[in-house]
Image (cartoon, grey):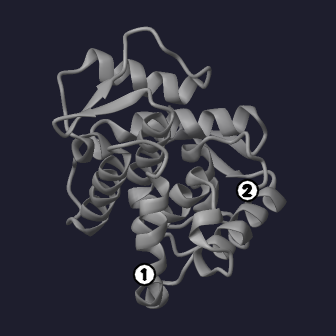
Amino acid sequence: MPNGSLSLPARLCLLAWDTTTNEVTGAAHLHHVVRAGALTELAQRGLLLDADSIATPVDMDSLTGDAVLDGLLELVRESRPHGWRTWVTLHARVTLDAVQAKLAADRYLRVTKKRVLGVFPTVEYGVHRATVVEALREEARQILEGPLPVTEIADRDAAVVTLAVAGRMSTLVPPKELGRHEERVAALTERSGAAAPGLRAVIREVRAGVVAAVSAPSVTTGG
């Protein structure tokens, strides 16, 4: 994918932006999708392992050099044990906030500071580099629709598309077209976890966590 230095959660955050309206699609669940991307990248890097279905840091010292990913690693280390699906939602907005702040610092997003009711400070984000977002989206569509065989797709790229579809990201595929991609998405899910033994099970659990979060009624989930 273009801008390959972007992390999985950063790519997923950018993919959610509709560059024609400069608004986020699926904003109610973007924090779950972005958190799932962070969990997936840490698992693919071997820094989060599966221990009896519990997301477990490989050690107490390893870092990625990415503030967002390292922040999640620290949170997992300092929290009581949880399964992968729980981590998709637990305090997930912390990860989204960190991703958006980093994308703004790197000038992928622009930020506008405002005050709610003239008192409470808040920030709003918008796309700053629309061409990057559009390139990411086109690449993701090519991965989703083919013709490149799944075995030739990088595991990180497969994971981006798998999680975007799980999060019903309409910027990538309209809801009415989701059904026709089921077989391809299943193959991409398996490809996402091909790098190490046991990783496929982790990817499936994380993806299932996204599907459950998106399908659930609108209630507070600790995220």
88 sits to left or right of 1: left
The quarter holding residue 65 reads top right
The quarter holding residue 35 reads top left
Q: Where does residue 151 sit, x and y in percent of width and height?
A: 58, 65
Q: Where does residue 7 sit, x and y in percent of width and height?
A: 62, 41
* Along the line of sight, the residue nearer the viewer: 19 or 13: 13
Q: Residues within 10 Å of mark 1 (few under 14, many from 20)?
A: few
Q: Is residue 17 above or below residue 64?
A: below
CA gap, disc 1 and disc 2? 22 Å
122 sits to left or right of 103: left
Q: Is residue 67 above or below residue 14?
A: above
Q: Is residue 118 above or below residue 174?
A: above
Q: Residue at x 50, y 22 (%)?
A: 70
Describe the element under mark 1 as helix, strand or loop.
helix
- Please name which of the two marks, 1 or 2, marks the residue nearer to the observer: 1
Q: Where does residue 188 sit, x and y in percent of width and height?
A: 49, 66
In the picture, which quadrant includes the C terminus?
top left
Q: Is residue 223 above or below residue 98?
A: below
Residue type beneath disc 1: Glu
Please give the residue where the numbered disc 1 appears in the rendered image: 183
Residue type beneath disc 2: Met
* Along the line of sight, the residue nearer the viewer: 29 or 66: 66
Q: Residue at x 81, y 53 (%)?
A: 129
Describe the element under mark 2 as helix, strand or loop.
loop
The quarter holding residue 187 reads bottom left
Q: How many marks?
A: 2
Q: Residues within 10 Å of mark 2 (few under 14, many from 20)?
A: some
Please give the residue where the numbered disc 2 appears in the rendered image: 1
Q: Residue at x 32, y 46 (%)?
A: 88
Q: Residue furthest top?
A: 61
**Mark closest to the chain's N terminus, 1 or 2:** 2
